[in-house]
Every structure is written in C-alpha cells, then in structure tokens.
Image (cartoon, rainbow, N blue to C red):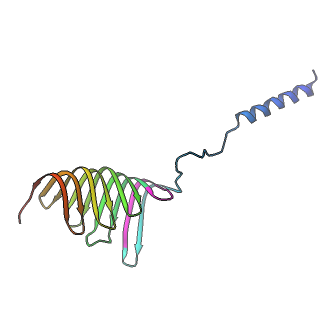
Amino acid sequence: MSINLFFLLAFGFLMGMFGYFSPNYTVPKDSAEIPTIELSNFTLYEISKRGIDHILEGEEGKKFEAYYAVTSAKFSDNTKNLFQTIRADNAVHRSDILKLNGNVHYVREDGLEFRSQEGTYNSKTSNIHTESSFTITQNGSRVDGNSLLYNTQQDTVSANKIHAIYQLK
C-alpha cells in the first residue's frame, strides 16, 4: 500500500467522522418559547411627565412575545392614590394581569398589608384575588381567611371563612 493511499483513506475516514459527529444547530419546531430579553438582578423604571410611575425589580426576568416572567419579583405602583408594592417569589405579567406565586406580600403606603401564597392582581381594576388562605393587617387590625377578592381603590373586601381582630379608634 502506498503512503498516498494511506493518507487518502485516513482523510476520508476523518471527514466521515466529522460529518457523522458534527453538532446539529437546528432548533426543534416543538421547542418551548424562547425569551426575547433576559435580565439578571435588575431594576426597571417607567417614567412619565409626573415622575416615576412603576418600578419593577427582580432576580431574573424573561420577556416573551406576549408576557414576561420574573423571579423574586417586586412591583411598585405610583399611579394610584396611595403608593403600593407587591412582591412574590415568581410572577407572570400578561396585559394588566399579574399572577403571583410563592410568598405574596402586598404593602400600601397607609400601612395595609396582605399576605398569601398565591394571588392575582389586576392593575386596571385594582383587584387582588386569591383562592388560598390570606392575612390582611392594618393599624393593629387583622383578618385571616380563605378565597379573597379585595379592591385596593374602593377598600371593598369579599372573603370566605374569615377570622378578624379589629381595633376600634
């Protein structure tokens, strides 16, 4: 066997291995959604002529085509009568609906606080809704119960199985 034939066979073998073992860069058609933007340890400000309207803070944020998802989320809203903040371990924001999961904590400027394990906040209607157990506290008063619908603008509450401690002034 000549040396040229040996190198030709070795080259052919290596090219065959390269073709067989080369990586496939095509994206499967049934893959999960791919975020258009990803952020880590971030703070976003929405500013208008009045000043800062909204603040969004998070550990990790992903913006998809129709929604965005945030871990260790904190949303602050300065567009209502009272400044308000809502936190959660995980949040998904779609249109004006904020779905919260894990250690939900709502705080308003006048001292009202709401805690639950899950919840939904509609920023247009100012409604907070949860199907799990909840606690609302303000100025020494406390309400515990299940399945809450609370309007933060009108201060109206609808809840099931409540237990309340109310401080009269």
Quarter-wise, where is residue 31 in the image? Answer: top right
Front residue of this view, candidates 33 and 58: 33
Quadrant location, the C terminus: bottom left
Q: Is residue 92 left or right of residue 144?
A: right
How many marks overall?
0
Residue occupying the far right of the picture: 2
Residue at x 36% of width, y 58% of height: 98
Apparent side of residue 132 relative to residue 14 in the rendered image (left or right): left
Depth check: give the residue in front, 100 or 40. 100
35 vs 155, nearest the viewer? 155
Prevailing secondary structure class for the magenta stretch in the rendered image? strand
Residue lying farthest bottom?
Answer: 49
The residue positioned 30% from the left and 62% from the top of the image is 85
Whether residue 55 appears in magenta in the rendering, the answer is: yes
Q: Is residue 84 above or below residue 72?
A: below
- Residue 13 visible in rendering: yes
Question: Does the magenta-highlighted stretch encompass residue 72?
Answer: no
Where is residue 131 shown, x and y percent of the image?
26, 50
Instruction: Please state the horizontal and vertical placement of residue 125, each as a whole percent of the image.
Output: 30, 67
Seen in the picture, residue 158 relative to 83 is either above or below; the reply is above
The outermost residue toward the top is 1
Q: What percent of the width, then of the height, locates residue 11?
A: 83, 31
Q: Quadrant of the N terminus?
A: top right
Q: Which residues are magenta?
A: 52-68
**128, 140: nearer the viewer:** 128
On the image, which quarter does residue 9 sit in? top right
Q: Is residue 7 above or below residue 130?
A: above
Instruction: Please report the residue visible at 22 percent of the width from the left and 69 percent of the height from the top.
Output: 154
Q: Residue 34 location in percent, x, y?
A: 54, 51
Relative horizontal placement of residue 92, taking residue 9 as reference (left or right): left
Dividing the picture into quarters, in which one does residue 97 lie?
bottom left
Q: Can the viewer see residue 111 in this picture? A: no
